[in-house]
Amino acid sequence: MENEHNEKPISVGQWMLNMFLTYIPLVNIIMLIIWAVSTTEPQSKVNWARARLIWMAIGIVFIFLFYAAIFAFLISMGGDFNNF
């Protein structure tokens, strides 16, 4: 299974293109998923894509918890949301 991956080093230009693609909303998630499950990409790129996806998931969980805590705080302070 290890020999199935292309083990050529990734050039600086390729890394720059990879990073550029991950800065574009929605394209980043699609490309990271493609790279994470690819069998033709170098193992280092596959691992990098998996790590980025894990960090994105952790960030989404923290954002959800942050906004839930703020909403709970506002509710506990007797916030009246009928005026919105």
Image (cartoon, rainbow, N blue to C red):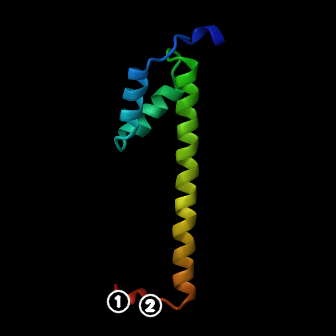
Up-down relation of residue 51 to residue 59 (above or below): above
Front residue of 55 and 11 = 11
Q: Residues within 10 Å of mark 2 (few under 14, many from 20)?
A: few
Up-down relation of residue 8 to residue 18 (above or below): above
Residue 48 drawn at (x, y percent) = 55, 30
Q: Does residue 84 appear left or right of residue 48 in this picture? A: left
Up-down relation of residue 71 to residue 58 (above or below): below
- Residue at the spot 55% in from the left edge and 67% down from the top edge: 66
Residue 78 drawn at (x, y percent) = 52, 91
Please say whether residue 71 is visible from this viewpoint.
Answer: yes
Residue type at tag 2: Asp
In the displayed orientation, state which residue is furthest to the top: 3
Q: Which residue is mark 1?
A: 83
- Residue at the spot 58% in from the left edge and 50% down from the top edge: 58
Residue 81 drawn at (x, y percent) = 41, 86
State the CA–CA distance, disc 1 to disc 2. Answer: 7 Å
- Residue at the spot 59% in from the left edge and 9% down from the top edge: 4
Circles 1 and 2, Cβ within 8 Å, touching? The answer is: yes
Please say whether residue 1 is visible from this viewpoint.
Answer: no
Residue 49 drawn at (x, y percent) = 52, 32
Residue type at tag 1: Asn
Q: Which image quarter is the N terminus in?
A: top right
Q: Which residue is mark 2?
A: 80
Secondary structure under the numbered disc 2 in the rendered image? loop
Q: Which image quarter is the C terminus in?
A: bottom left
- Residue at the spot 37% in from the left edge and 41% down from the top edge: 23
